Image (tube, rainbow, N blue to C red):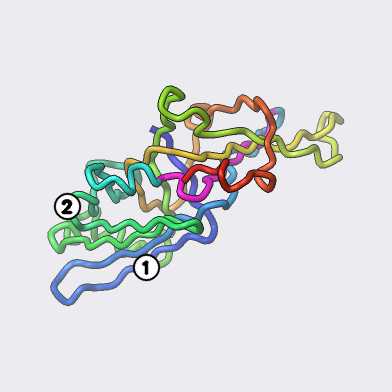
Amino acid sequence: MLFGAYLEGGGLEVRRRSEGGVRLAGRFPYRKTATLSDGGRTGRPKKEVFEPRAFAFRVDDPTKEIHLLVGHDFNRPLASKLTGTLALTDSDDALTFTADVAEEISQTSYGKDVIAQIGAGLAFGISPGFRIPPQRAVAEPEFIEEEPDDGTLDENGDPRRGALIRHVREALLYELSIVVRPAFKDSEVEKRNWEPGPVLQPSRLHAVQRWR
């Protein structure tokens, strides 16, 4: 399982329901660049972008389960698609959701904590848990773009190399998580495929080349 970074342009809100429990609403924007690693002293920065409707396969399939979790922990569920408590709406701009968190869940220790954190503006990140489909199912679910060098030198006097940007065209979404701040360990970042291959410029992609 891979975890995506929180992206600027997302957001969360919480409302109390008259019948008990709370309703959460949030969005995960597409075509926003998230930095997974600054590259350290010698490596290249690594970034990630989700193309429009990258999660559509499991979102649109009424038989596929998707959970809303706290911190990517399946032991801390808030809502789910197949129970009818998580509604997902996909568009070219963002994946949006509303979640009806039952009173029984909102009164658990983790439920109380995350609702309080959202209300206080401390938990505002939405991070997807996903997998990339195998090439036998999808020929090109992702591609790597290399940013041009910026012309500056690093601390060793060598040209500073531009970032590797991983564009995800199609991903299998299993959960969305509410997070205070995504933490990416080296081992997590390195799970991605950072082989540049043919360099493509997203602005030059025709509509038929983008996954829908």
Q: Nearer the viewer, residue 162 or 172?
A: 172
Predominant SS of the magenta segment = loop
Q: On the rendered structure, is 118 left or right of 196? A: left
Question: Which residue type does callout 1 highlight?
Answer: Glu
Q: Is residue 89 magenta?
A: no
Say which residue label 1 marks.
13
Name the spot of residue 173 as percent of width and height, x first. 36, 42
Q: Residue at x 21, y 61 (%)?
A: 101
Say which residue label 2 marks.
83
Q: Is residue 54 magenta?
A: yes
Question: Which residue type does callout 2 highlight?
Answer: Thr
Q: Quadrant of residue 144?
A: top right
Single out the residue that lies furthest toward the top: 136
Q: Quadrant of the N terminus?
A: top left
For marks 2 and 1, the one nearer the N-term is 1
Is disc 2 surrounded by few (<14), some (14 to 19) or many (20+) residues within 10 Å? few
The secondary structure type at the circle numbered 1 is strand
Name the spot of residue 93 as percent of width and height, x first. 50, 58
Q: Which residues are magenta?
A: 43-55
* Number of disc labels: 2
Image: 108 above or below 211 = below
Q: On the rendered structure, is 17 left or right of 57? A: left
Cα gap from disc 2 to disc 1, whole angstroms: 21 Å
Single out the residue that lies furthest toward the front: 208
The secondary structure type at the circle numbered 2 is loop
Q: Residue at x 58, y 37 (%)?
A: 166
Name the spot of residue 50 as percent of width and height, x first. 52, 45
Numbered disc in front, either 2 or 1: 2
Q: Residue at x 35, y 48 (%)?
A: 176
